Amino acid sequence: MSKILQTGFNTYAFANLFSKPRAAVVPSKSVIQNNLEQRQQFHISPSCNEIRKLARLRVVDNSEIGKRAMAEGKPPRCIHVYNKRSVGYIGDKVLVAIKGQMKKGILVGLKQNQKPKIPKFDTNNIVLIDDNGTPLGTRIHVPIPTILRTILKEKTHTKGADYTKVLAIANRFV
């Protein structure tokens, strides 16, 4: 012990290494419940409801790759938003990573606060399309906003992709 004191080690820390372990103090149920109630009142970080890079999306058509990804619990993630703001809104085209592949899609429902007369959804919904604007699936399972008709007709060019095919496979509108 005298050699340890001469070398400059902390004797208190050294003695604690060889002491008996103490019993763990377990808080009562009321203390735990009070802590949970306090945590529920305050949010640590703000929620990000916008469609940006790495945002998780939900495939709402019946395409094969979309069904497999959603069944495995690995939803597609946004890689790029095709607009100047880099924030996705209803009707915007996005590039997503799904099952190790890159696919394009159209946003048909968003969680973020919308303009008047555009419904707010519980999830961020996407319909997968190919390069020509043709949907990969044959049916859309969720209702899509009626304002999407005017948005997609404006984005459809005579020589470019035809996004109105997405409206043709939808069976419910909100």
Image (tube, helix red, strand yellow):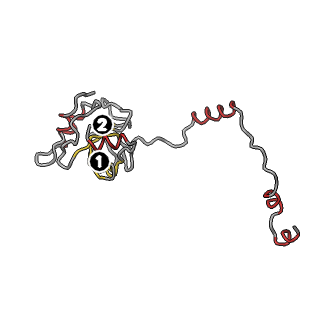
Residue 78: which numbered mark, if any? none
| Picture coordinates of residue 7, whole percent (x, y) | 82, 72
Mark 1 or 2, which is nearer the eye?
A: 2
Q: Nearer the viewer, residue 36 or 13?
A: 13
Label 1: few (<14), some or many (≥20) within 10 Å? many
The image shows residue 81 at horizontal and vertical percentages of 31, 49
Q: Amino acid at mark 2?
A: Val
Going by the numbered disc 1, the residue's amino acid type is Val
Q: Which residue is mark 1?
A: 94
**Nearer to me, 151 or 144:** 144
Asked if residue 68 shows in the view, the reply is: yes
Q: Give percent across and percent down for residue 120.
A: 35, 32
Spatial CA span between label 1 and label 2: 15 Å
123 to the left or right of 152: right
Residue ID at (52%, 43%): 45
Is 45 displayed left or right of 24 in the figure?
left
Figure quadrant of residue 168: top left
Residue for point 25% across, 34% down = 140
Q: Is residue 85 visible?
A: no
Q: Which residue is mark 2?
A: 60
Identify the element where label 1 is drawn: strand
Q: Quadrant of the C terminus?
A: top left
Q: Answer left or right for 131 relative to 7.
A: left
The part of the image, by quadrant, that contains residue 164 is: top left
